[in-house]
Image (spheres, rainbow, N blue to C red):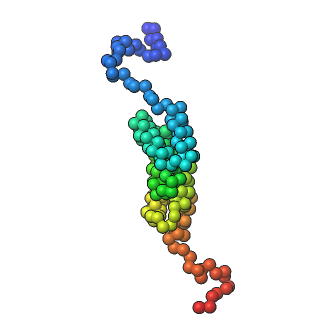
Amino acid sequence: MPEPLYHPWGTVTPDFWRTPEPGTAPVPSELTAETLRARLTVIAETAGTGHLPDAAALAARLDRDTTAEYGDLHLHTVQVREVRGYLAALAGDHTSGLSWYLHAAQLRVTVQGPGHPDVQAATRRAYSLWRAVPAQTDRQRLSAALLTVATDIHGPDSPLVHHIRGRLYDLAAPLPSSAATPPGQLHNV
């Protein structure tokens, strides 16, 4: 019995020859990687000229388009959301910026896995932005969110989580002024 001949295109069935009904063919993608890069360039140029609200509006529109085209769990979407966080931070809205960065880190770990270098970098960006948050804002809530996301992504015993916990402890319980005195030099009270 001779072996069947397999063509590179597979088995041709009658469905192969059927033409789709008008309006049912998939619409070609309008948001290619090149288009995405071009729109991100326009956003960066707009932000660079100091028009941060305009850049943020362009980024929001690009986020809607990217999400509609690729869905939430795609690197293009994650990158656009990181840009939104960066723009918010540039505008002085550290709370929104950090929220976007933490959201993007969670998406990255879902898409790329916890050990991926981009996930590590995303968590470091979120931590760096958190450090820049002014103390008078809702830093406590943001601290809890940062620690929760970092623990979820990297595990409770990771060096990064230990570092964040230590920094949070330092901020929550500052040393009294007498504790800063060198040993052997006591203050007279």
Name the image quarter holding the N terminus: top left
The percent coordinates of residue 171 (x first, y second) are 52, 69
Q: Residue furthest bottom?
A: 189
Q: Residue at x 44, y 28 (%)?
A: 29
Name the image quarter holding the C terminus: bottom right
Of residues 53 and 169, the one drawn nearer to the viewer in this rendering: 53
Horizontal relation, residue 24 to residue 126: left or right: left
29 up-or-down from 10: above or below: below
Of residues 145 and 86, the one drawn nearer to the viewer in this rendering: 86
Q: Residue at x 56, y 76 (%)?
A: 175
The percent coordinates of residue 119 (x first, y second) are 53, 48
Q: Quadrant of residue 17?
A: top left
Do we see residue 170 in this rendering?
yes
The percent coordinates of residue 182 (x first, y second) are 66, 80
Horizontal relation, residue 147 to residue 187: left or right: left
Q: Residue furthest left?
A: 21
Of residues 76 and 58, the one drawn nearer to the viewer in this rendering: 58
Of residues 85 and 41, the one drawn nearer to the viewer in this rendering: 41
Q: Residue furthest top?
A: 1
6 up-or-down from 160: above or below: above
Do we see residue 153 in this rendering?
no
Q: Residue at x 50, y 66 (%)?
A: 135
143 up-or-down from 42: above or below: below
Q: Residue at x 56, y 57 (%)?
A: 128
The percent coordinates of residue 67 (x first, y second) are 42, 39
Q: Quadrant of residue 180?
A: bottom right
Count of numbered tags: 0
